[in-house]
């Protein structure tokens, strides 16, 4: 049997001990001549520096660390620098609200500014913890002037009963309240397409016999009917003057007059 000179031979009884230096340098390989099996035994000598670098575990400290994130939160743009803490927008602070307060009564809550936000007190001293005074009520109970809602242009404003639509409302930045600052609400259809009531009434009185009022409101079928019937021999014209005057007849797209 030919054995490479890279191995060191060591006879122990009937076994030949071969160092596994090609792999980790820390074990010996022994051949049992009786059974023909291959066994490994640990080496008593320490590993070399190169072997340690190859067999380093995942628990070792890495050479390079990831750079810490320096991204500024989006709410910082809403927060005035070095302003009064009590006048900061609600998105710039975190408050310990107490839902057991009496509805409609004044309440005081402890607040803390969010990271990257700087504010001062009445003495122009920087502070992080402060208190705010507000009325005890949920955000959806606020007055309509304290929040902004989405508009719908697909519902009919002139209908009986009057239609509603699902809107998403957001509380204004300078208003404080309890609960979610974004909430759904059912609102009446109140959008406008730019049609003027005064213009429609004037066309109905002067050129109603030719259907000008109906054409202006986008009701071209009725307009053609009035045009070829000469305003229904004047009867249809008088009826439209009354209907437009009281606001019963509106734009064809279902919007409100302006």
Image (cartoon, grey):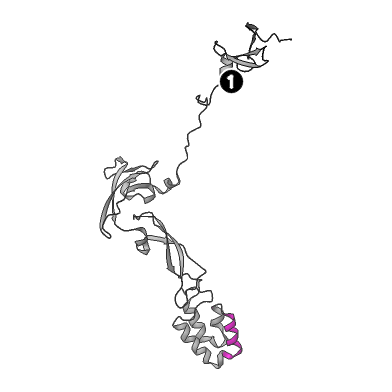
Looking at the image, residue 138 sits to the left or right of residue 218; the answer is: left
In the image, residue 151 lies at what x, y percent? Answer: 47, 65
Mark 1 residue crowding within 10 angstroms, few (<14) / some (14–19) / many (20+): few
Question: Is residue 26 visible to the viewer in this orientation of the structure?
Answer: no
On screen, residue 44 above or below 164: above
Residue shown at 46% from the left, 65% from the top: 166
Q: Is residue 223 magenta?
A: yes
Residue nearest the viewer, comparing 241 with 38: 38
Label 1's element?
A: helix
Looking at the image, residue 183 sits to the left or right of residue 1; the answer is: left
In the image, residue 251 lies at what x, y percent? Answer: 51, 76
Residue nearest the viewer, comparing 206 with 96: 96
**Furthest residue to the right?**
1
Residue nearest the viewer, comparing 121 with 154: 154
On screen, residue 209 above or below 250: below
Looking at the image, residue 201 sits to the left or right of residue 115; the answer is: right
Q: What are the residue bounds of the magenta stretch?
A: 217-230
Q: Which residue position is annotated with label 1?
A: 54
Residue shown at 59% from the left, 86% from the top: 225
Quarter in which the N terminus is drawn: top right
**Total numbered labels:** 1
Question: Is residue 166 visible to the viewer in this orientation of the structure?
Answer: yes
């Amino acid at each position: 049997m030919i054995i490479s000179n890279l191995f060191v031979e060591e006879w122990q009884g009937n076994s030949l001990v071969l160092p596994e230096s090609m792999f980790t340098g820390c074990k010996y390989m022994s051949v049992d001549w009786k059974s023909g099996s291959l066994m490994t035994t640990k080496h008593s000598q320490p590993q070399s520096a190169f072997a340690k670098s190859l067999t380093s575990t995942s628990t070792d400290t890495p050479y390079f660390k990831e750079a810490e994130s320096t991204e500024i939160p989006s709410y910082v743009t809403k927060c005035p620098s070095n302003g009064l803490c009590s006048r900061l927008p609600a998105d710039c602070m975190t408050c310990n609200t107490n839902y057991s307060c009496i509805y409609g009564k004044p309440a005081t809550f402890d607040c803390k500014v969010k990271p990257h936000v700087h504010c001062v007190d009445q003495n122009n001293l920087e502070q992080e913890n402060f208190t705010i005074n507000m009325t005890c009520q949920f955000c959806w109970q606020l007055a309509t002037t304290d929040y902004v809602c989405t508009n719908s242009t697909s519902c009919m404003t002139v209908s009986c009963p009057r239609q509603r639509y699902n809107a998403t409302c957001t509380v204004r930045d300078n208003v404080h309240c309890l609960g979610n600052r974004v909430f759904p609400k059912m609102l009446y259809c109140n959008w406008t397409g730019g049609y003027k009531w005064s213009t429609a009434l004037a066309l109905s009185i002067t050129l109603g016999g030719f259907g000008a009022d109906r054409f202006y409101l986008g009701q071209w079928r009725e307009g053609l009917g009035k045009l070829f019937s000469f305003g229904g021999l004047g009867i249809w014209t008088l009826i439209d003057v009354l209907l437009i005057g009281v606001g019963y007849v509106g734009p064809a797209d279902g919007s409100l007059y302006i």
